[in-house]
Structure formats: structure tokens, C-alpha cells
Amino acid sequence: MQRTAILAAGLALACVPALAPAQALYKCRAADGSLSYQDHECAADAEALVPPPIAPPPRDRYVPKLPGPTPVPVAQDDPVERPRPPLPRYYYCEKPEGGSYVSETPNLYPRQVPLWTLDRYSPTFGKGLGAMGALYTEVVDRCRVLGRGETCAELRKKLDRTEHDANLAFRDTRDALDGQVADLRDTLAAHCY
């Protein structure tokens, strides 16, 4: 009997539509011990039991999107600032045997030159014999740092040479030379007025 009442109560709950409005449900135990579920209060001679919890109706799956932060418009016409290239350091070097050159790194290592290339009035003339024998002597180039104006003049010469090479270059090397031309122009614009 109790099983039948429980099954009947279970079937009754299963038949309740899911979207029906929630109503009170009462679980009652009669004097003979049978359980019953009903929508009205238990009789005076029956014991009222705690009803099973009723699941809330299913929630709507729609979740409205909240407005996010508004993106800041970026002006497309603003040029991207490139970092300012530093002014390179160049050295003007004189060879004891004659001649001069400009370099980014001074050659301060001793080297052997033939004695006949030196002028007899040179400070290194007759200073001793080199490792190669009596016809050679050891010399070191004298170098000094170029000033700003001299460095700008050297940069302009280098720009002319690089532009000339870029105009005659094949496609595989032209991009690298064009990049060097752009870097030299930026350096000249930043430091040489």
C-alpha cells in the first residue's frame, strides 16, 4: 500500500508541467502509515511531514551583454615616432708611411711597414728593426675623434655612396641598402642641421 502511494505520488509529480506556477505541496502520513502528497493541508488525524524540495523553474539562458569599456579611437594620421638614432663616432687616422682614412674604429694595433715607405723625417724612421728583418719597422696609426661638423660631412659622403650603390643594386640587396639610406637620412636629420 505504501509503495503504491509513493509510486502514485511520483507519477503525479512527473505529470506536473515544468512551467506550471509553483504551488504548495503537502506530504501527509495517515494513521495506518500510508504516505500521500496533496496540494492542500493534511487532515487533522494525519501527520504533516516536510515536503520534498521543489526545484525552481529553469532559468532563461539569455544573459544580456553588459556594455564594455568604449575603445579609444586612434588617429590613423599620427606618424609613428621612430627612436632617434645616436650620432656615430668617427676617427680620423694618419698613417706614418703617408695617407689618411676615416673609420668607425681606430686601428691602434702595431704593424710592420717597409722602411722605404717612411720619410726620413718621420718620427718612426730608424727606430729599430722589425720582426721581418732589416727592411721593416713597426708603426702605429695616429687617430683622433672627429667633431660634430666633420662627422656630419662624413655622414653626407656615406649617404651619397650608399644611395649610389642602392641605385645600381640588384633586387636581393636593394632592400638592405634602402634601409641603410633611411637610417643615414634619419641620423642626418636628427643631428646635422
Image (cartoon, rainbow, N blue to C red):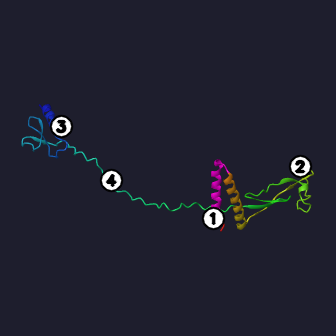
Q: Is residue 155 above or below residue 53?
A: below
Disc ID at residue 14: 3
User: Horizontally, is 53 left or right of 186 in the view?
Assistant: left
Q: Residues within 10 Å of mark 2 (few under 14, many from 20)?
A: few
Q: Earlier in the sequence, mark 4 or mark 1?
A: 4
Pick whichever of labels 3 and 1 is earlier in the sequence.
Answer: 3
The earlier-in-sequence mark between 2 and 4 is: 4
Mark 1: few/some/many CA within 10 Å (<14, 14-19, 20+): few
Q: Secondary structure at mark 2?
A: loop
Q: In the rendered structure, are the residues bearing label 3 and label 1 in contact, judged by CB atoms less than 8 Å apart?
A: no
Q: Is residue 110 above or below residue 44?
A: below
What is the CA distance from the residue labelled 3 to the residue labelled 1? 85 Å
Q: Which residue is mark 2?
A: 132
- Position of 41 with respect to 74 (left or right) is left
In the drawing, does residue 36 fall left or right of residue 127?
left
Sequence-earlier tag: 1 or 2: 2
Q: Is residue 70 magenta?
A: no
Where is residue 130 shown, x and y percent of the image?
89, 52
Residue that numbered label 1 is attached to: 189
